[in-house]
């Protein structure tokens, strides 16, 4: 076997042995940078998605309340609350007008796990449906801000 042929075989075997440590480190750094960029974008959008879900839930509850009012000629009282959308409240003036099966299947919780609040009369309209936000307290800013039906 000639020296040149032996050298080519040796070079080929070395190139087939795998990656060097430096190549692996470069790939790990690149994957880490890409992971960081994706994480920043995903976690940044998480707060806005919670607010958007709360607004969508409130809009659905508003629609159900309007259907309730059309059938029963009034909104549920604050004491009856949003539960009146699932089953007829006690003392309903004309229970035969209540829609069989209710107006929604179940009451959703806000994205932070708390029930939506209901008050009638509302601050700006006939009623308010609201969530206290991530901090579960009145007031706040950003994701902690209260979300009211009258603000939609």
Image (cartoon, rainbow, N blue to C red):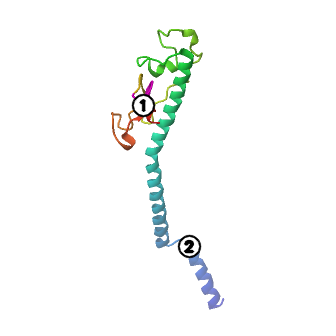
Q: Which residue does the image show at 50% across and 9% down from the upper left?
A: 93
Q: Which residue is mark 1?
A: 130
Q: What range is drawn magenta here?
A: 123-130
* For residue 100, above or below residue 10: above
Residue 53: x and y, percent? 49, 38
Q: Nearer the viewer, mark 1 or mark 2?
A: 1
Which is the main secondary structure of the residues drawn in magenta?
loop
* Residue 128 image offset from top left, x and y in percent: 43, 27
Q: Nearer the viewer, residue 63 or 47?
A: 63
Using the image, determine if residue 90 lies above or below residue 151. Answer: above
Packing grade of label 1 (10 A; few <14, some 14-19, many >=20) is many
Question: N-terminal of the two: label 1 or label 2?
Answer: 2
Residue 7 lies, in percent from the top left, at: 60, 86
What residue sits 63% from the left and 90% below the top? 4
Q: Residue beneath label 2, please? A: 17
Counting other residues with Cα less than 10 Å from the Cα at mark 2, is it few (<14), some (14-19), or many (20 or more)?
A: few
In space, the residues marked 1 and 2 are separated at their CA atoms by 64 Å
Name of the residue lying farthest toward the front:
124
Task: State the residue at coordinates (45%, 32%).
Answer: 149
- Quadrant in the rendering for residue 119: top left
Q: Is residue 119 visible?
A: yes
């Amino acid at each position: 076997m000639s020296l040149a042929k032996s050298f080519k075989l040796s070079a080929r075997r070395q190139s087939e042995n795998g990656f060097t440590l430096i190549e692996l480190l470069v790939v790990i750094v690149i994957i880490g940078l890409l992971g960081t960029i994706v994480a920043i974008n995903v976690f940044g959008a998480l707060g806005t998605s919670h607010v958007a879900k709360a607004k969508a839930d409130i809009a659905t509850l508003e629609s159900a309340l309007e259907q309730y009012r059309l059938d029963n000629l009034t909104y549920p009282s604050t004491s009856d609350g949003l539960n009146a959308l699932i089953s007829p409240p006690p003392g309903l003036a004309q229970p035969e007008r209540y829609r069989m099966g209710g107006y929604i299947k179940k009451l959703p919780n806000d994205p932070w796990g708390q029930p939506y609040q209901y008050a009638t009369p509302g601050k700006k309209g006939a009623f308010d449906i609201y969530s206290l936000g991530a901090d579960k307290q009145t007031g706040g800013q950003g994701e902690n801000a209260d979300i009211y039906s009258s603000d939609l």
